[in-house]
Amino acid sequence: MPGTTPHRTPGLLSKGTWPEARRIADILRKETVGGILLLAGAVAALAWANSPWAQAYADLRAIRIGPAALHLDLDLATWAADGLLAIFFFVAGLELKREFVAGDLRDVRRAAVPVAAALGGVIVPALLYLAVAGGAGAARGWAIPTATDIAFALAVLAVIGRFLPTALRTFLLTLAVVDDLIAIVIIAVFYTAQLSVLPLLGALVPLAAFAVLVQRRVRSWWLLLPLAFATWALVHASGVHATVAGVALALTVPVLRGKRAGGGGPEAGPGLAEHFEHRFRPISAGVAVPVFAFFAAGVGIGGLDGLAEALTDPVALGIVIGLLAGKPIGILTATWLVSRFTRASLDEGLAWIDVAGLSILAGIGFTVSLLIGELAFGAGSDTDVRVKIAVLAGSLAAAVVATVILRLRARVYLRIHQAETLDLDHDDIPDLYQAT
């Protein structure tokens, strides 16, 4: 009919809104530094654990601190995994809530692709792991290759993909956010060995008080931090992994700005979730995750022979295959199925090889994979040692393969960028896109 606009199926991995692109660019800059620090912590731990002073590293991990009366006399490795990572999951929870309340993911059409991709990136690696690892004892580690390490992956992407389209960076970040949500559910449901109901119910009291205060826009740390610590301690005592407390606290924080007194417009300044994220993301990326990596990644490899022996173990082999093959297969398949059923095509200028490179990059499963490995097989056990070697090897392999692919693609986008910057004949630019 005249005057009507024809219906257009939205493109896959479109650029999104400008405020969202700017926000993600800020996150990328912070996560890049965090990824570098994470890598430094892991390398330092590996070097120390394979040096003549390896026993000193083990002794450091075993130092116990904390009040015994509250059952919190934990070793440093446990404090890093249960305590510091709660900060990481608090920030992840804030990001998750913001994406679904005020970010681009509040649009169901935009959310469909990263949600489906994240689900595919969990299901396929888990199935491949079970197919390779086999036995009932090994099956407990099925979730190890399902996690994507956002800091590590974004750090690699920032180094190699300066000229890659913003849509790819947005896709990786939103995919990782949904992946974090799935990891949180997996940890809470499948890796709670013994549940104590009374402490869990008790955790609801400080959690509710925290929620009331943040809903009233209270920012006073001397009120909020004791309530947050009490919630964390009670969840830890209940048998549910304490990092879940970080997510529960984050989900109570309001994302949208309040209203002025008298029913006027929105208050000036950012929402409380954005304020907390600004405050705690540097602590998470710069302290919590690197320290956890330092205490978790230190494993004695035993030279090339020890490495070969560890990687031939079915559990380790299942993890490597899950990260290196399962992640890209699952993410690519799910993304293609969304495009097939919605009849949407990739946004202009993008190619499926871009999605493939990004999917392989999502196979970097470091922080949460190491955590799940400890929960599945027990920290320090022989299987846990092989899990750590496999996670490191699989993540490194995924990073290398993704770097090769995305580096080549970045050169193509660099030529397009130069053509646009130099203001070449507009008719020549589509030819460059065709070359992709």
Image: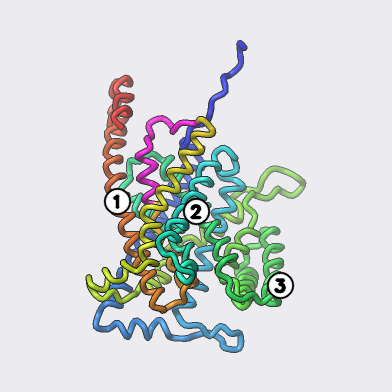
Give the alpha-carbon distance from disc 3 to disc 1, as whole Å: 47 Å
Residue drawn at (59%, 50%) of the image = 269
Residue 371 in view, yes or no: no
- Marks 1 and 3: in contact by CB < 8 Å? no
Whichever of callouts 2 and 1 sits on the residue coming sooner in the sequence is 2
**Looking at the image, residue 109 lies above or below residue 420:** below
Q: Nearer the viewer, mark 3 or mark 1?
A: 1
In this view of the protein, which residue sits in the foreground, 268 or 22? Answer: 22
Q: Which residues are magenta?
A: 344-361
In this view of the protein, which residue sits in the foreground, 289 or 358? Answer: 358
Q: Amino acid at mark 2?
A: Ile
Residue 335: horizontal and vertical position, in percent?
47, 41
Give the alpha-carbon distance from disc 2 to disc 3, as whole Å: 32 Å
| Residue linked to disc 1 | 401
Residue drawn at (66%, 62%) of the image = 218
Q: Would you call the spot at circle 3 few (<14 residues within 10 Å), some (14-19), or many (20 or more)?
A: few
Q: Amino acid at mark 1?
A: Val
Q: Residue furthest left?
A: 304
- In magenta stretch: residue 60: no
**Image quadrant in which you'd find residue 332:** top left
**Looking at the image, residue 92 lies above or below residue 349:** below
Whichever of callouts 3 and 1 sits on the residue coming sooner in the sequence is 3
**Looking at the image, residue 182 lies above or below residue 409:** below
| Residue linked to disc 2 | 123
Q: How is the image coloured?
A: rainbow
| Residue linked to disc 3 | 201
Q: Is residue 257 left or right of residue 310?
A: right
Q: Residue furthest top?
A: 2
